[in-house]
Image (tube, helix red, strand yellow):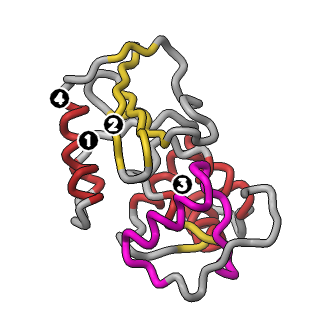
Amino acid sequence: MYYFTNVQSPLGMLSIACDGENITGLWIEGQKYFLGSVSDKMVRTDDLPVFLTVREWLDRYFAGEKPEISELPLRPAGGEFRQEVWKILCEIPYGEVVTYGSIAKKMAEIMGRNRMSSQAVGGAVGHNPISIIIPCHRVVGTTGSLTGYAGGIHLKIKLLEHEGVDMSHLFIPKKGTAL
């Protein structure tokens, strides 16, 4: 069984899910793949200790602090490939961005391959079930294109600006499937 609660944030309403002890999901209202990783019944419960911990973490994050991801017990549901990509996302420093291509290179090394598809990495990044905390918003296209945020490009920009990212080399693509 899974539990959920809702929290108001500067981005709008957030829904947080857990298995009782570990965070299994965090979605922004209206986000693609909302509850996509939840395969069981959800019960609303607002006072679980893990939810209090996440609320405190989010309060600190939105206050401009840089809380560590490792402070939270995370258990996102996904296959081995996605899990590895999400681990890499957790290594992206606050206020910095990396490209899908650089993650693909790391994944190729991990998997013992010569190369890895950036599109495969993009699929894993896009299906990250723990938004904001597992910082998929810090991933951009090789040319600086702000593509691929399930919460919407406007929220990706808001998160990057909140973290103080230099936005001068980043842009919204004219058209594409990730918008």
Q: Amino acid at mark 2?
A: Val
**Which residue range is magenta in the image?**
141-166
Q: Which mark is residue 11?
A: none
Q: Which mark is residue 54?
A: 1
Q: Which mark is residue 85?
A: 3
First in residue order: circle 1 vs circle 3: 1
Q: Which residue is mark 2?
A: 7
Label 3 sits on a secondary structure element that is helix
Task: Report how far apart the C-alphas of labels 2 and 1 lie in the structure.
Answer: 10 Å
Label 4 sits on a secondary structure element that is helix
Where is residue 123? Give x, y as percent: 68, 50
Location of residue 85 with respect to 159 vertically, above or below: above
Give the residue drawn at x 64%, y 66%: 104
- Mark 4 vs mark 3: in front: 4
Task: Report how far apart the C-alphas of labels 2 and 4 lie in the structure.
Answer: 14 Å
Q: Quadrant of residue 74?
A: top left
Task: Report how far apart the C-alphas of labels 4 and 3 lie in the structure.
Answer: 28 Å
- Mark 3 vs mark 2: in front: 2
First in residue order: circle 2 vs circle 4: 2
Residue density around tag 3, few if under 14, some if 14–19, many if 20 or more, within 10 Å: many
Task: Report how far apart the C-alphas of labels 1 and 3 lie in the structure.
Answer: 22 Å
- Circle count: 4
The reply, left or right, for residue 25 in relation to residue 31 is: left
Residue 105 appears in the figure = no
Q: Which residue is mark 4?
A: 49
Q: Amino acid at mark 1?
A: Val
Q: Amino acid at mark 4?
A: Pro
Pointers 4 and 3 in contact (C-beta within 8 Å): no
Magenta run includes residue 30: no
